[in-house]
Image (spheres, rainbow, N blue to C red):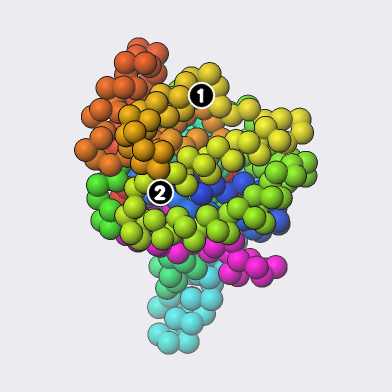
Amino acid sequence: MAHEVTSTGPVNIAVIKYWGKRDTELILPTNSSISITLSQDQLRSKTTIRASPNFTKTRLWLNGVEELNLDNNVRLQNCLRATMKLRKEYEDQLSDEIGIDNVQPISSYKLHICSENNFPTAAGLASSASGFACLVYTLSQLYELPISTTELSKIARQGSGSACRSLFGGFVNWQMGTKQDGSDSQALQIAPHDHWPELEALICVVSDAKKGTSSTEGMQNTVKTSTLLQHRINNVVPERMKLMIDAINRKDFNKFAELTMKDSNQFHACCLDTFPPIFYLNDVSRAIIRVITEYNNTTGKPDEFKAAYTFDAGPNAVIYALKQNIPEIINLISKYFPPSQNNVTYFSNPYNLFSNEKENI
Ligand code: DP6
């Protein structure tokens, strides 16, 4: 009997950025990070996995066309191996309980995996986060694994660091952990999506071209060459994590906005401090920063903000703001960046629901 499961999974956008690994094989970060999971309405990954005793080889197709060579894809192999191992242990346990003849040996079946994003892959829109989170979640459903989301996050982390945060909805903390084996480097939910329903996100797609320097490559060059990153890891992020968690818990938009913008700025400063430097922001990104800064100046108070920008490893802006200010911000952005040139996408509340369909064929 073949088994098939389809799930969809969301993107997350960090407000305290992850940048740097202390272990590149296990994907252990040099600092903790915090993100918000976005609604799946407009950005999502979708994965279908079929397991069959008749398949001779595990295969994966990306976006319906490209078949990936899995032999040298260490990250994918690590996720597959970790979930298969758990399934095997579960089958052994079930065999003891209900007899070996009543247990489907799915862990020994080869898989056919189809994964697709409904948005540009590798353009700095967190496609690896939603893609790996969705893959690992779908495997856990296929294998009916009796494990917690936090345990699952440790497996998704080995696919792509930021993927561990996409397994949760709402506001998510990736604790860097201190153990060498990575057993305490995991994601936890700070608050669910409905904790702060007034907070919304606006995605400004400045460019959907594939980025020049991948996050994976870029961050290790930063680890090797940037003294600013060492300062950030040791002296800035630990305190910022505490302040951000507190701001989220208290729904304090002014503090949240200040920390979000400062952290994005420092991440891009670390990119500039990398040798040779890495540039992810372009002229349009910098112009968006200026427009948001001017807009915030209209409050007349230096510690009062109406919007917060943040940029990942690409030129696209994500603007967090309270619902009542979103129409004004959309007007502003479309005045300075006409939609014919720039595609501004609007998202409602931070939200996450892994939808899941299951079939035994
Ligand atoms: C700038 O998770 O894509 O988006 O672990 O090498 O796959 P790998 O990197 P990835 O890096 C994301 C970096 C970031 C910041 C963040 O999401 O925290």
Secondary structure found at label 2: helix
User: Can the viewer see residue 202?
Assistant: no
Residue 254 at x, y percent in the picture:
37, 46
**CA gap, disc 1 to disc 2?**
21 Å
Quadrant in the picture for the C terminus? bottom left
Residue at x-position 64% and y-position 49%: 232
In this orientation, which residue lies closer to the viewer: 226 or 56? 226
Residue 326 at x, y percent in the picture:
26, 33
Q: Which residues are magenta?
A: 166-192
Residue 142: which quarter of the image? bottom left
Residue at x-position 40% and y-position 43%: 303
User: Can the viewer see residue 224?
Assistant: yes
Q: Is residue 174 magenta?
A: yes
In this orientation, which residue lies closer to the viewer: 315 or 43? 315
In this figure, which residue is indicated by the disc labeled 2? 256
- Vertical relation: 40 (above or below) 186: above
Ligand 1 under 8 Å from disc 1 Cβ: no
In this figure, which residue is indicated by the disc labeled 1? 286
Secondary structure found at label 1: helix
- All told, the count of numbered labels is 2
Residue type at mark 1 is Arg
Q: Residues within 10 Å of mark 2 (few under 14, many from 20)?
A: many
Quarter containing ligand 1?
A: top right
Residue 239 at x, y percent in the picture:
55, 58
Left or right, 119 with respect to 41, comes to: right
Quadrant in the picture for the N terminus? bottom left
Residue 249 at x, y percent in the picture:
35, 61
Residue at x-position 36% and y-position 38%: 301
Which label is found at residue 348?
Answer: none
